[in-house]
Amino acid sequence: MDWIEGIGLFAGFLGVSGWYPQVKRVWIEGKADGISVPTFVVICISLVLWLTYGILKNSIAIIVANVCALIMIASVAIGAYRVQNQ
């Protein structure tokens, strides 16, 4: 069963790493055009629910992936809000 969690961890890593360009664009380049803050807030809520599910199922892959994704998505949402409201 450990290899199954390994697949989940790798999938989570790939999914989370895909958000890096958005984080970089918002926080380093200071550009947030085309980013919908409400959409990212809904995604954050979804990730919190998935994180809760992972905790209840005791799945380390789901927990780790969703904590990391939540950090990335929240940073995009917060950064975009900051840039759009300057």
Image: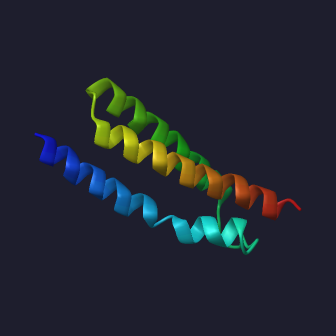
- In the image, taking residue 75 as reference, residue 47 lies left or right, namely left
Q: Quadrant of residue 85?
A: bottom right
In the rendered image, the quadrant that contains the N terminus is top left
Q: Quadrant of residue 54?
A: top left
Q: Is residue 33 above or below residue 12?
A: below
In the rendered image, the quadrant that contains the C terminus is bottom right
How many numbered circles are shown?
A: 0
Out of 22 and 33, give the one closest to the viewer: 22
Residue 32 in the image, given as x and y percentages of width and height: 71, 69
Q: Which color mode does the image show? A: rainbow
User: Most extreme residue toward the right, as rendered?
Assistant: 86
User: Most extreme residue toward the top, as rendered?
Assistant: 56
Q: Residue at x 41, y 35 (%)?
A: 51
Residue 28 in the image, given as x and y percentages of width and height: 71, 70
Q: Residue at x 47, y 51 (%)?
A: 69
Q: Is residue 42 above or below residue 51?
A: below
- In the image, taking residue 23 as reference, residue 17 lies left or right, namely left
Q: Is residue 1 above or below residue 77?
A: above
Out of 68 and 85, give the one closest to the viewer: 68
Q: Residue at x 70, y 52 (%)?
A: 78
Out of 9 and 77, give the one closest to the viewer: 9
- In the image, taking residue 64 as reference, residue 58 lies left or right, namely left
Q: Residue at x 28, y 28 (%)?
A: 58
Residue 20 in the image, given as x and y percentages of width and height: 53, 66
Residue 71 in the image, given as x and y percentages of width and height: 56, 48
Out of 8 and 39, give the one closest to the viewer: 8
Q: Is residue 38 above or below residue 27?
A: above
- In the image, taking residue 62 as reference, residue 41 lies left or right, namely right
